[in-house]
Structure formats: structure tokens, C-alpha cells
Image: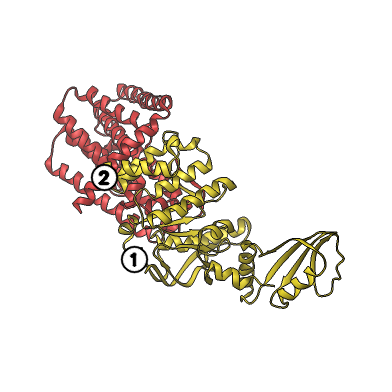
Chain colours: A yellow, B red
Amino acid sequence: MSIIKVGNLCKTFKVKTKDEGLKGSLRSIFSPSFRDIQAVNNISFEVEKGEILAFIGPNGAGKSTTIKMMTGILQPSSGTIQVLGLDPTKQRKELSYKIGTVFGQKSQLWFHLPPLDSFNLLGSIYEIDKVKLKKRIDFLKEVFEIEELMDVPVRKLSLGQRIRCEIAASILHEPEIIFLDEPTIGLDVVVKQNIRELILRLNREEKTTIFLTSHDAGDIEQLCKRAIIINHGEVVLNESIKKLKHDYLNKKVISIKYNEPVNVEKGDLNILKHKADSLKVQVDTSKQDIEEVLEKLIKLGKVDDIVISDPPLEEIISFIYRQSKEGGIDEMV
Amino acid sequence: MLTEVRKSLKLMLYYLKFNISSAMEYRTSFLIQCFGMMLNNSAFIFFWWILFNNVNTIGGYTFRDEMMLWAISSTSFGICFITFGNISNITRMILNGELDTYLLQPRDPLMNIVCSKTEVSAWGDTLYGIIMFFLIRGFDMKGFMLFLLFCVTGGLILACVRISFHALSFYSGNVEGLAHLVTDFLITFGIYPKGIFTGVVKFIIYTVIPTAFIVHIPAEIIMQFSIVRLLGVLAVTLLWIVIAYVMFYRGLKKYESGNLIISKL
């Protein structure tokens, strides 16, 4: 069942432009000129209940603008949005009881006060019954391991601790969908992993639908089943992560460790590295048969170890960005 | 509608408690700012006292009348800045796209935004005005009730005029300078006798910078009660609330958000 339906969504911003320097500034006072910027251009997609979706794209692609329209912050120029059966433009308040948001760059906790005070204030804003609020805070304290942070002013928390408190604050009212806009921005690897585990737990235990934007391929690979890639305000790809990898992985890297030093004739092999008893070869599966290459390599000597790896997801995404910029996604070169 | 008003008042009270505890995080600073502001205001008594020693009345006002203007101005200003302490930041918040977190919450965004912060020194202003009232009028409880009512209406009008000017940022970009200028005018016009304002300025203090309804007319009603004038003040308060709401919500449709890194202070 689709709980988010976006149809032909567009958003145009009117931006004031001016010529260089003081002269340009003075001229713009008397005859201001404006330019239309199409931030989101005719995008359509749906999100199923309980899904973890990656909504990705390079900077300025229109990700945040789309999220802001879906949460009722911005008004679309045209198109339709339905989130949990509600129109965010007209039913923003009703919708806000059912959704949670974490903008990595915007805090909803009070900087000078401990998280517990912010939680209580948010409880009052969301009209959560006092007994229920206490239970919920106790539950979140345990899940997010923030018990000892609850009475420390937010300004004294580390970024990782703050983000954990931010996510806890955003799900205080048990939202059905949570929009995470770059939640792991600026975090170290260990904290990133913690946050990912928390997101997965939320999805698994509370059946929360997760709408995630991130520049971190690790977030996408470990959390999401499907990715929507947008660039220049348009959807360039809407695929499952599995299919995405399968379709764009026509390059494999074979690393072999031999029992003794081997001699290799280059021939049609694309050798990336050769060092006595170890060899790294890249195979373009659209041009070469991987079985043939493997056979050839195994015949060279006694094999101790062999690894066939895919290029990292990051490389695939960056390839899709580049291709969409050039005007078409064909094959990975 | 009534439920919404009740919810908004509840939120306002919660924020008030919340902001006081936030201010108490820096207790010494809180006390210094409060008493510093009272001291600052007191300095003006001497200025007026010396002036009224040389002339009997200014624009028809005696020293006591002038001090009543100060009492109402000061407490109205205090109530406005304690309860709606975030108004001064509206322009910046609009331009930097800082309204997002408020728009994501199930509360009236305007109330949520303006009440979410308090101005610590405004406690000093509020207290100063109350002390001043008792010094002028003695233990006049009926007068004090009227005084409190007018400080609330005054605080509301002050807040609404400032919100209306800040809301212009939705339409024409940065109006922070203009909004601050309007706040300065609202304070300055309110602490001088009404009689000295004539012509265009008199028109202004009854319309765009309505200090006549914030300070002057209330002071006259406390001195000589008039139900018609009291209703007039209440009607003007209501009118400014409507203007502020219309200006803000029409503008909000043009809000463009932003991507700055933001903390709630």
C-alpha cells in the first residue's frame, strides 16, 4: 500500500539576479531582474508502507526541496502530493502528528537546555498525555542509549550524541513516516553505524517508513531496499538497490593470490596490478566472458586465494550522476 | 476557533516556563540584565524631573502623567519581549529559512515562532513599570487592574505591529532595519506627551505606529475612566492581531526555506 504518492511535482523559485559590483547593485535597486530556477521538475513516485527508501542526488538536485514540499514547509508550484492520505499543503497540521523529520543541519533541541526539557516541550507541542510521554521517553532513552545525556545541556553534547537525541525527539510522537535529511552528516564511522542500526530498529520494531536522503553510500547500501536518484530536479532512476547494482555492475575486479610467482601475457586482459605472486585484473562483462578470463587466470599457476568484487556503490551513483548530466544513462564505462 | 486560542495560550504559558528555565541556566547574567535595565530606565526619571522643575506642563502633561506613560510603556514593552521574545528574529529566520522546524510542528506557526524565545532584560522593564505605577498612584487596586489590562493590550499591539513589519520580509527581502526602526518609534513616541505630536505625526501615532492606543489613551483612561475609550483600545488591539495574522500567513505562502546550519538558542 502506497502511503506517499507524488505526481508531476514541480517547484520553481524566483531568484533576483544582479550584475557584478557596486554598479550592478545600484542598477538592481532601480530595475531589478529575476530568473526562474526550476528546483523540482515534474517528478512522480510512490513509497510503500514500511519501506526504507533512499532519495539521493548531488547537491542542488532538489532533494531537500522535495522533502520540504512533502512535509508542508514549501508550497509546490504544480503537481500533487499525498502523504498518509493527506495533502501537506492544505493539511500540514494534521500531517505533522503523523510524520517525524530530522534535518541533519537543523536542530529541534534547545541549545542551552538538556534534551529532557526539549522532549517535555515537544510532548506538550504534540499534545502527548503525560503518562504516555514518560513511558515513551523511558523507551527512547533505552533504545537510543541516551539515559546519561538527558540532563546535560545540548551545547555540551558531541555531534553523535546530539543526533541520537535529535532522532529520539523526532519520533517522540510515534510518527508513521520519518524523513531523514542527511542524518549522518559529519559523524565518525562508529557513530554512523550506531545511527544506521537505530534506523533499522525503528523500521523493524515500529514499522516506521523511512524516507532517507544521504550522500553516504554506506547509509544507502546498509539501510535501503530501493533508491530514487534525482538530478537537476528530475527523477533519473527509480530502482531497487539490488537491481541498481546488477544493472550497473558490468565491471568486476578479480584479485588472485598464487602459490608461486607467475608470468602473465597481457593479451586482452586489463591488468590493474601484477606483483610476483599476486594479480589484479578488471573484467568488463559486457565485452568479455568472465568465465573465460577466470579459466585463463587459473591456468597460470596454483591458486591460494581468489576474490571477485563489485565496484563500490559510490562509484555507481557517481556514474549515474555524470550520465544524467550528459543526458542519458546507458552503460557504465 | 476557541480550542485553537486555548491551545495557543497553553503553549504560550509552557514556553514562558520553558524560557525562564532556559534563562536561569545563566542566573547571574539574568539578574544583571534585569536590574541593569531597571537602573537604565530609572536614569530617565531624573531627566524628566529636572525638566518639569523648569516648566509646569509639557503638551498638557504633568510630571506624574509623564511617569504614567513610562510605567505603561515599560511594562507593555516588557510583556511583549518576555512573551513574544522571538519577534526581533523573524526577518532573519525568514531569510535564512529557519521557520522549517516550526512549520513541522502541529501548532500555530506564528505563536510557536514568536513565543519560543524570551528577552531576559524585559523582566527588568516589566518590574520597573509596576513599581513606577505604585509610586505614582499609591495603592490604587482598580487603577492597577486597568494598568495591567492596558499593559497586556499594549504588549499585544506592540507585538502585532512588529510582526506585521517583519512579515514584509516574505515579500521584499531584508526589512530588518525598518522593523527595528519601527520598534524604536513605538518606544520613543510612547514616552513623550501626546500633546506635542501634531499634524502628520499625530496621524502616524493613531495608525501605523499606534502608540496612542498602546500608551497615551490607556494612561488617560486610568486617570479618568471611560468605557467607550476602553472598548476602543480593545477593538484596536483586535484589529492589529488580525493585521499581523493576515500579513504573516499571506507571506508564509511565499516562504522559500534554506539550508543554513541552525541551532535553537
Crowding near the residue tagged with mark 1, few <14, some 14–19, many ≥20 C-alpha atoms within 10 Å? some
**Of A106 and A116, which appears nearest the observer?**
A116
Disc 1 on helix, strand or loop? Answer: loop
Residue A44 lies, with reference to residue A204, above or below; the image says: below
Across and down, in percent, residue A71 comes to: 39, 60
Q: Is A143 displayed left or right of A322 in the figure?
A: left
Indicate which disc, 2 or 1, sits on the residue closer to the N terminus: 1
Across and down, in percent, residue B18 comes to: 34, 37
Three-letter amino acid code at disc 2?
Asp
Whether residue B211 is visible to the viewer of this picture, yes or no, is: no
Which callout, 2 or 1, points to the residue nearer the camera?
Answer: 2
Residue A330 lies, with reference to residue B231, above or below; the image says: below
In contact (CB < 8 Å): disc 2 and disc 1 = no
Name the residue located 30 percent from the left edge and 27 percent from the top edge. B127
- Mark 1 lies on residue: A87
In this view, which residue lies farthest toward the front? A302
Across and down, in percent, residue A167 comes to: 44, 48
Name the residue located 24 percent from the left edge and 28 percent from the top edge. B62
Crowding near the residue tagged with mark 2, few <14, some 14–19, many ≥20 C-alpha atoms within 10 Å? few
Which chain does the numbered disc 1 sit on? A
- Mark 2 lies on residue: A129
Task: Give a yes or no on whether discs 2 and 1 share a subunit.
Answer: yes
Name the residue located 20 percent from the left edge and 54 percent from the top edge. B1
Name the residue located 73 percent from the left edge and 71 percent from the top edge. A283
Q: Is A233 displayed left or right of A274 in the figure?
A: left
Q: In what quadrant of the picture does the C terminus of chain A appear?
A: bottom right
Whether residue A331 is visible to the viewer of this picture, yes or no, is: yes
Across and down, in percent, residue B184 comes to: 39, 40
Three-letter amino acid code at disc 1?
Asp
Disc 2 on helix, strand or loop? Answer: loop
Which chain does the numbered disc 2 sit on? A
